[in-house]
Image (cartoon, rainbow, N blue to C red):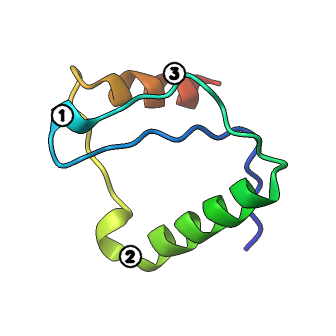
Amino acid sequence: MALLISNAILHTVGNSEAQTHYSDIELEVDSETVIEYAGKQVRRLLRSSAARNATFTADSPVYHLVKAFQKD
């Protein structure tokens, strides 16, 4: 399966909301390090049945980001 990633951003999420960091800076998707890291994460997610589905509440910042992305 081919996958094209044209934009990427890395947010860090801890065990509590106090540990969450939202980044404003996109990663350099042409960087070999980013390509390897993103590929590893995508393969891990595709293998994990627990990681395939997500539900965001309407007050979640991620919910609005996903909705905006879906409109593009």
Mark 2 → mark 1, Cα distance in angstroms: 24 Å
Kindly identify which residue carries mark 3.
Answer: 68
Q: Report helix, strand or loop for mark 3.
A: helix
- Could you tell me the amino acid type at mark 3? Ala
In-front residue for pair 52/20: 20
Q: 49 left or right of 69? A: left
Q: Where is residue 32 in the image (x, y as percent from the top left)?
A: 81, 59
User: Are dots 3 and 1 in contact, CB under 8 Å?
Assistant: no
Kindly identify which residue carries mark 2.
Answer: 48
- Could you tell me the amino acid type at mark 2? Ser
Q: Position of residue 65 (x, y in %)?
A: 45, 25
Q: Report helix, strand or loop for mark 1.
A: helix
The residue mark sitting in front, 2 or 1, is 1
Kindly identify which residue carries mark 1.
Answer: 17
Q: Report helix, strand or loop for mark 2.
A: loop
Classify the position of the C terminus by image quarter: top right
Crowd band around label 3 with a 10 angstrom C-alpha radius: few (<14), some (14–19), many (20+):
few
In-front residue for pair 61/56: 61
In-front residue for pair 70/12: 12
